[in-house]
Image (cartoon, rainbow, N blue to C red):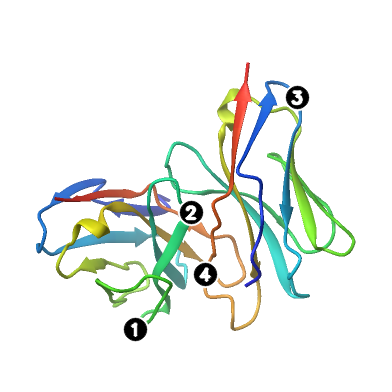
Amino acid sequence: DAKTTQPPSMDCAEGRAANLPCNHSTISGNEYVYWYRQIHSQGPQYIIHGLKNNETNEMASLIITEDRKSSTLILPHATLRDTAVYYCIVRSAHGSSNTGKLIFGQGTTLQVKP
Amino acid sequence: NAGVTQTPKFQVLKTGQSMTLQCAQDMNHEYMSWYRQDPGMGLRLIHYSVGAGITDQGEVPNGYNVSRSTTEDFPLRLLSAAPSQTSVYFCASNSPGNTIYFGEGSWLTVV
């Protein structure tokens, strides 16, 4: 699975959009980009994933560049409860390499401020 | 539907003791895995299983054993606890190609 690079920390004002970047320059064609977050050392929580098209769900939007070497997670209206560590992970979603393994980096600590 | 359930939530062990962290899932997921998380670090894979009777090692398997006798359960055994195994342990499960779900964690301190 490809490795990812994220900034160690970011701040965001409450109510504003939080844009969290991720570089995954070695991503291969069958690898998806996943985002998880971890609040107060709870179990990681799934946010969103995508292959090459932009994706949106009730929690966030995921923008993937055309060359797929980077992506941005967007929390459109950040709240204090969004303060967490956000992990960007790439993994194969199909085929023999998908065994439930995730390779976590250190993630981005997002601090939402009032 | 409880999802992924881990027990115990907190445990203190003395060096050299053995214990088992329990993990159960009620989603009929084929894949299960164990991670550990040290302070300020991301999660690291210890062992994983792609089905009953099948297990394999992850990044940091030393000092841990697993078995998968049923689809629902995936216990993690510490054979002889060491202070370096003080950590938070997370169990996870998923169906092939689908989202991975995590338990709430088990805090282990080895003194």
- Residue holding disc 4: A100
Image marks 4 and 3: residues in contact by CB distance under 8 Å: no
Label 4 in the same subunit as label 2: no
Three-letter code, disc 3: Arg
Q: Which chain carries label 2?
A: B
Callout 4 crowding tier (Cα within 10 Å): few <14, some 14–19, many ≥20: many
Frontmost of labels 3 and 1 is: 3
- Residue holding disc 2: B42
Circle 4 sits in a helix, a strand or a loop, which is it?
loop
Which residue sits at x=18%, y=61%? B82
How far apart are the alpha carbons under marks 1 and 4?
Answer: 16 Å
Q: Which of the numbered marks, if any, corresponds to residue A16? A: 3
Circle 1 sits in a helix, a strand or a loop, which is it?
loop
Earlier residue among tags 4 and 3: 3
How far apart are the alpha carbons under marks 2 and 1?
Answer: 28 Å
Circle 2 sits in a helix, a strand or a loop, which is it?
loop
The image position of residue A3, as x and y in percent, is 64, 65
Q: Mark 1 lies on which chain?
A: B
Callout 1 crowding tier (Cα within 10 Å): few <14, some 14–19, many ≥20: few
How far apart are the alpha carbons under marks 3 and 1?
Answer: 49 Å
> In this orientation, which residue lies closer to the viewer: A89 or B85?
B85
Three-letter code, disc 4: Gly
Image marks 3 and 1: residues in contact by CB distance under 8 Å: no
Earlier residue among tags 2 and 1: 2
Callout 3 crowding tier (Cα within 10 Å): few <14, some 14–19, many ≥20: few
Which residue sits at x=56%, y=28%? A81
